[in-house]
Image (cartoon, grey):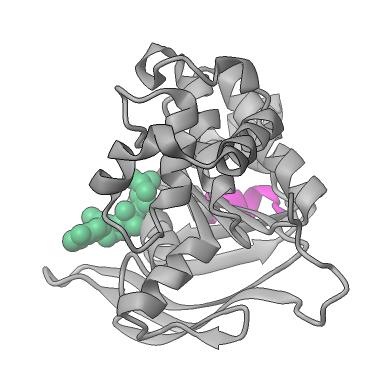
Amino acid sequence: MKSIDMNTKRTCAIRAKDLYKVYPNGTEALKDVSLEVKDKDFIVVIGLSGAGKSTLLRCLNRLVRPTSGELELFDEDITCVSGSRLKHVRRRVGMIFQQFNLVRRLTVLENVLVGRLRFNSSPVGLCMTLLRRFPKREKEFAFECLRQVGIADLAFRRADALSGGQQQRVAIARALAQEPEVFLADEPIASLDPRSSETVMQTLMQIHEEKGIPVLVNLHHIDFAQRFGKRVLGMSKGELIFDGTCRDLCRDTVSTIYGDKAEEALQELDAA
Ligand SMILES: Nc1ncnc2c1ncn2[C@@H]1O[C@H](COP(=O)(O)OP(=O)(O)OP(=O)(O)O)[C@@H](O)[C@H]1O
Ligand SMILES: [Mg+2]
């Protein structure tokens, strides 16, 4: 399977400059956010509920249009793209959500194949009726994606017969099937038990390390952030107030990011 060619000159996957997002109801969800995501990055974004983490991720793959500022994906200006160019941007960015968003009545393999179809020109409904006529190489590719997340043995199970952790790994395989160049994950472990959370985070880390794909993950839990984040971004009230390594994440910074929930976060940090 294709991996990012590390010999190319490209070093910046995403570049955001002076990003603002004001929702129609007046909420300022992002204020003057600038950041660069490099190929080598595995970034964890932390912050309280409402800090703007999801808005940031959604702006980065243009699910949300920033109110102002500039956005680049691999040196291409995507601030205002629409139509087929926007579709192309979405295909290059693998997105993983808290709620997995699988088609419950389809098998695991079919869900991964849908991931591959999502960005084709034919409507998904039509493609789904053709699923059983999928070329062999497409099915093999989907199997390979499932192997990479360690659940090829579940390929013919219905998606709704899986545990939460397994479903999230299907969602990762589905995103892999897009052959993305960057991964964005919005609270991928928020509905999972600690053991499944660990497996899902390790799966993301393994993909990052083996395929050289940069990853940006929103997480509530600071202990996971500390363990997995090579780089940590701290958000508070729409602003990016910390950008550094876990080692730089001192108690004062944690207190600033988590406000009146700091005590809880610091306990997690001590326990990690
Ligand atoms: N579609 C929307 N319309 C209006 N306001 C919104 C919308 N989406 C988010 N917001 C507001 O923008 C702010 C940032 O929300 P966002 O979902 O980005 O935060 P978050 O850090 O992801 O929070 P959580 O940890 O709860 O997921 C919040 O005040 C939220 O209420
Ligand atoms: Mg969120």
Identify the residue shown where x is 69% and y is 29%. Answer: 147
Identify the residue shown where x is 54% and y is 36%. Answer: 221
Foreground residue, 66 or 51? Answer: 66
| Total labels drawn | 0
- 177 versus 33 height, above or below: above
272 relative to 19 in the view: left or right: right
**Spot occupied by residue 133 in the image (x, y as percentages of width and height):** 42, 37
241 relative to 121 in the view: left or right: right
- 227 versus 214 height, above or below: above
Q: Residue furthest right?
A: 7
- 42 versus 187 height, above or below: below
Identify the residue shown where x is 49% and y is 29%. Answer: 109
**Spot occupied by residue 46 in the image (x, y as percentages of width and height):** 53, 50
Could you tell me if residue 127 is visible in this image?
A: yes
**Spot occupied by residue 250 in the image (x, y as percentages of width and height):** 70, 51
**Spot occupied by residue 73 in the image (x, y as percentages of width and height):** 56, 77
Foreground residue, 131 or 158? Answer: 131
Foreground residue, 152 or 187? Answer: 152
Give the magenta range.
Answer: 249-256
Could you tell me if residue 223 is visible in this image?
A: no
Q: Main secondary structure of the magenta part?
A: helix
Q: Residue 255: within the magenta? A: yes
Q: Residue 148: within the magenta? A: no
| Quadrant in which the C terminus appears | top right
Identify the residue shown where x is 37% and y is 71%. Answer: 30
